[in-house]
Amino acid sequence: MKEKIAKLLIILHIFLFAACKNIAPPEPFGACPTPQQVAWQRMEIIMFCHFGPNTFSGAEWGDGTEAEDLFNPTALDCRQWATVARQAGMGGIIVTAKHHDGFCLWPNPHSTHTVAQSSWHDGKGDVLRELSDACTEAGIAMGVYVSPWDRNAPTYGSEAYNETFRLTLESVLSQYGASDSKGRRRIFEQWFDGANGEGPNGKRQTYDWPLFNATVARLQPDAVIFSDVGPGCRWVGNESGEAGETCFSTLNSDGFTPGAGSPGTVILNRGDRDGQHWIPAETDVSIRPGWFWHENERPKSLDELLHIYYTSVGRNSLLLLNVPPDRRGLIATEDSIRLLEFRGALDSIFSTDLAQKGVIDASNTRGGWRGKAFRASNLLDSDFDSYWTTDDSVLTPVLTLTFEQPATFNRVMLQEYIPLGQRIEKFCIAYTDTDGRRHRLTEGTTVGYKRILLTPTVTARQVQIKIEKSMACPVLNRIGLFMDEITNTKQ
Ligand code: FUL
């Protein structure tokens, strides 16, 4: 009898031990983001400000011969830029510290074509200083566009220019940015333009990209470096606000360089399924036709902005929306009103997640009944780090949302937990109507950080999401259903 009890106790112990033992999370898959890239992606929308001599001349590309005095904003107020950005829900501002004309918005000691040579504030003005303080106060991040192409620098087209450009970068990256809690100036994104034309001497430059990237990494180790091919994030391949319907955050960038040496717009738009590096797409587009402010141009409509949101953030990319300050040095009222309308519309569309009114069930959950940490209900909370996933061998699971009261929606949102990589490459969604009939609703390829599907308006008792192809066990942290009654964008 005693022996039997002892045996039972041992079995019970083994059982309890197995039950209590934590089920291991999935291994990261493929190239994965750095914490800085994750934080960057989670900003979702950031502001671009093209500002410089072109604002005053009406050009889009200055040729570098513009008189410094041309730059003369009458009422510059970077606090207004930062306030508008913050109120519009943008996480940061990237300013054109130097565009192709070479004019520097700060007193750059390595150039003779800067605010210091202008009569604006008697040559003592400094846009980057003002913006750094404004971003700090507003609690948003600051990034810089520093054009490698320089139509003013006399050394452009020779090896000496690479050194001038390195020093120029040092000048920006060691002094400016939003202050962190320790008072250090932080640049969250370094923007390198791919345009590479002639300098004042009619020569083209062979850029020393490793030197430029190393300079950024040394002075601003947390900055995400943008160029056509990264290394931090990549150009989306167009300026119309459209990421690929298939959009991988991974890219095979080895051997490629920004500009003419990039892999081509089709690949940049889509990424590479087996990409060796995590280089997510950034969608840069202007609220107005031009990048710089022009008197006769007007901002895009709310509907156009919402459409851009769906084709950028909704397709696994970050939206970098250009809002050019005018000749006063202010964001025009019509642009700021439009941005607030845009934010208001997004807030209202995405404030009610109908999925949260349902009960969710998964055909497989990692670790079965012991895998509580990975349960399907994690998909319905807004905690970024809680996710649902499956056993390693299960690549085509089905998620089912069931509603007691039918849900009416026309947007489906899916989010992969990107710290563990991008995995899903095909899925389909079906629903059951109030009469119990099942219909195919939509399908898609990649998900990534965020995928929003535009569907006809349907009323469903049940919604099924089937992962049809995944490179490793899928890891999703959010499923949402929303009703957009604002935009005219259909599907
Ligand atoms: C392009 C530039 O040539 C445009 O002037 C603008 O700055 C845009 C964002 O990038 O390559």
Image (spheres, rainbow, N blue to C red):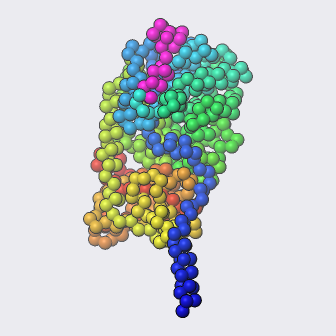
The residue range painted magenta reads 115-136
Furthest-front residue in view? 2
Q: Is residue 29 magenta?
A: no
| Residue depicted at x 60% and y 59% | 27
* Residue 272 visible within the image: no
Vertical position of residue 46 compared to residue 73: above or below:
below
The N terminus - image quarter: bottom right
Please name whichever residue, 27 or 490, is drawn nearer the observer in this view of the structure. 27
* Residue 120 visible within the image: yes
Furthest-left residue in view? 405
Secondary structure that dominates the magenta span? helix
| Residue depicted at x 44% and y 33% | 140
User: Is residue 261 found left or right of 333 in the rendered image?
Assistant: right
Vertical position of residue 383 compared to residue 176: above or below:
below
| Residue depicted at x 47% and y 58% | 387
User: Is residue 233 found left or right of 427 in the rendered image?
Assistant: right
Q: Is residue 134 magenta?
A: yes
Residue 43 placement (x, y as % from top left): 45, 41
Residue 356 placement (x, y as % from top left): 34, 59
Please name whichever residue, 471 or 440, is drawn nearer the observer in this view of the structure. 471
